[in-house]
Image (cartoon, rainbow, N blue to C red):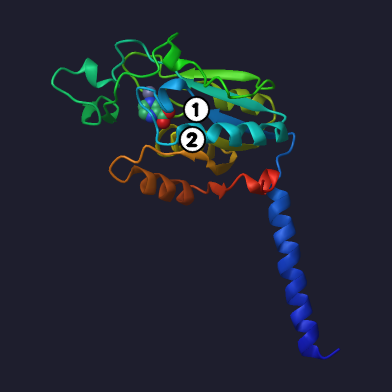
Amino acid sequence: MTKTIRTVLAFVAGVLSCAVAMSAELVPTSKSALIVVDVQNCFVEGGSLAVKDGLAVVPIINRIAPRFANIVVTQDWHTPDHASFASSHPGKKPFETTRMPYGEQVLWPDHCVQGTEGAALVKDLDLPTAQLIIRKGFHRDVDSYSAFEEADHKTSTGLAAYLKARGIDTVYVVGLATDFCVAWTALDARKAGFRTVLIEDATRAIDLNGSLAASKAAMKKAGVTTITSDALVGKD
Ligand code: VGL
Ligand code: ZN
């Protein structure tokens, strides 16, 4: 064997073992949790804050869920007069913004009101092994896109402590919407010290004034790994 061939072989072996190590690193373990964000009627086709093609995430989430020993589901869960609703601000229209004590707030159509059909999980979501449903956004004056922390950046939902108490070190995030609740959840997961993986094809975005590109850049900067579901379950 010439030296050149040996060098080439060593390089190929290096690349291969690196690829294997990378994919092994992505396989969920007993210390991984799937966080299924806000797959609720209000955010899918026919809902009051419908995310384009939102229902498409449901079969993908159903397919990957059996790979996870730990599953947490979230629900956006607002009071009827919630401060994030345009209807609570006379003269304001949905998708305009206002200043709240904690910063700029997008004003949304009324959505996900506690106990209503809109706030219910999408019927076809099939997660019989999910262990925790965390509800957020239930304080009238504070929004909560993130499953970890309310928009005041002070009030905890308790999720980080729950996951840590259960020995979780890695979270995989899916659901709606990519650029709001999914992204804020992924960013706060990094802040709380979890390895964080976004399963991109199991999310859909609202994309308001460039919010999708901005959220992707922020997640990349924060060290969120992005994959597609075929890395976990293979292609159909
Ligand atoms: C969400 C806007 C308002 C979301 C929730 O789930 O992404 N977006 N409330
Ligand atoms: Zn909301």
Residue lying furthest left: 91
Q: Dot 2 corresponds to which residue?
A: 188
Q: Residue at x 19, y 25 (%)?
A: 93
Q: Quadrant of residue 102?
A: top left
Quarter of the rendered structure image containing ligand 2: top left
Within 10 Å of the Cα at label 1, are there few (<14), some (14-19), or many (20+) other Cα atoms? many
Q: Secondary structure at mark 1?
A: loop
Query: Residue extending furthest right?
Result: 1
Residue 75 x/y as whole percent? 49, 20
Name which residue type carries label 1.
Phe
The numbered disc on residue 148 is 1
The residue located at (34%, 43%) in the rendering is: 211
- Secondary-structure class at tag 2: helix
**Camera-side residue: 129 or 25?**
129
Front residue of this view, candidates 20 and 194: 20
Residue 212 drawn at (x, y percent) = 38, 44
Looking at the image, tell me whether mark 1 or mark 2 is earlier in sequence order.
1
Query: Does residue 145 appear anywhere in the picture?
Result: no
Q: Does the closest atom of ligand 1 sit within 8 Å of the Cβ of label 1?
A: no
Look at the numbered discs 1 and 2 and tell me whether their residues touch, using CB distance below 8 Å: yes
